[in-house]
Amino acid sequence: MKTVIYYYTGTGNSLWTARAVAAEIGGATLVPMAGVQDDRDSAGADAVGLVFPVHMWGVPALALRFAEKMTADPKKYYFAFAVNAGQVSRTLVQLKEIMESRGMTLAAGFDIALPSNYIPWGGPGPAAKLEKMHRGAAEKIKTAAALIMRKESGHIEKGPLWQRIIFTFLYHRTYNMVPKMDRGFWTDEKCNGCALCAKVCPVEDIAMKDDRPQWLHHCEQCLACIQWCPQEAIQYGKKTPAYERYHHPDIKMKDVIVRPGKK
């Protein structure tokens, strides 16, 4: 089965998931959503996967824009993985509906829980908790991969009803606010002007001015900039100086650097 997996990642959880899925199904071509203009890489593929983080309890804008560029092919088997910190809510149902409006059928959608990288709300948690989540995600991916290899349909995971009601409401209320939420970022005295924050941003939302990052207000809230900063000099709000940083331990900074619109 020829498979292409498109992924969007900020701090590595989704890239690790995409790699793990590819390994379980016997190999697949991995393509960053931020690095392409369309889905031409999937021409001739039997299966197409989407792997992305849950942002504000729904599909992130970058993944939505990519889904809108996809070319419907009734012969293809489509699947998705929504990576989140335990609150998948209605994300995969939302994606299913979007794809249906484009003439595609999302055959399977899986909820993958991994440590939170949304540092404005706190650090990732103790090491034992992180290890347990990593192990659990690996086991879940094995189960999901078996379904994918059999091309089974109808498996779309979702959160409990209260999540789907409350968090979907919050998603719609906050979605248009996300691009300008970068106004909460700032740098402290540890910033050395290395510009790595600009390099890891998947949407080129950061420009360097006088050796300091300036956010340009088309943010995705992926938190790559704050989590990958080697000096831990980027902050968000008042509390992040006290919080531990997180990126997936199996992913390196070079793995997440992708220039938008380029491969």
Image (spheres, grey):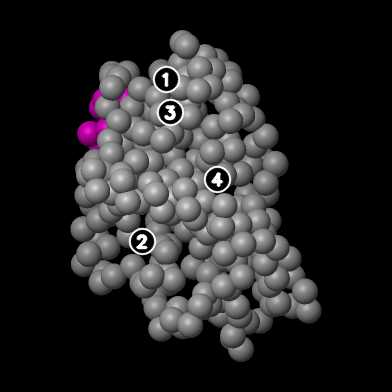
Q: Amino acid at mark 2?
A: Ser
In depth, the one of 171 and 5 nearer the eye is: 171
Compared with 35, 246 (above or below) is below
Left or right of 86: which side holds 40?
right
Q: CA distance from mark 2 to mark 1?
A: 29 Å
What is the residue that sits farthest to the top in this orientation? 75
Tags 3 and 2 touching, CB below 8 Å: no
Mark 4 or mark 2: name the one nearer the start of the chain: 4
Give the dominant element type of the magenta stretch: helix, strand or loop.
Answer: helix
Closer to the eye: label 4 or 3: 3
Residue drawn at 74 percent across, 78 percent down: 211
Tags 4 and 2 touching, CB below 8 Å: no
In depth, the one of 208 and 89 nearer the eye is: 89
Residue 185 seen from this side? yes
For disc 2, the marked residue is 116
Compared with 185, 200 (above or below) is above
In depth, the one of 88 and 37 nearer the eye is: 88
The local crowd at label 3, few if under 14, some if 14 to 19, many if 20 or more residues have their Cα within 10 Å, is some
Mark 1 or mark 4: name the one nearer the start of the chain: 4
Mark 3 or mark 2: name the one nearer the start of the chain: 3
Residue 16 seen from this side? no
What is the residue that sits farthest to the right in this orientation? 210
Mark 1 or mark 3: name the one nearer the start of the chain: 3
Residue drawn at 21 percent across, 67 percent down: 128
For disc 1, the marked residue is 105
**Boundaries of the magenta span:** 142-149
Of the 4 image quadrants, the one containing the C terminus is top right
For disc 4, the marked residue is 61
Closer to the eye: label 4 or 2: 4
- Residue 256 numbered tag: none
| Residue 260 % position (x, y) | 67, 46
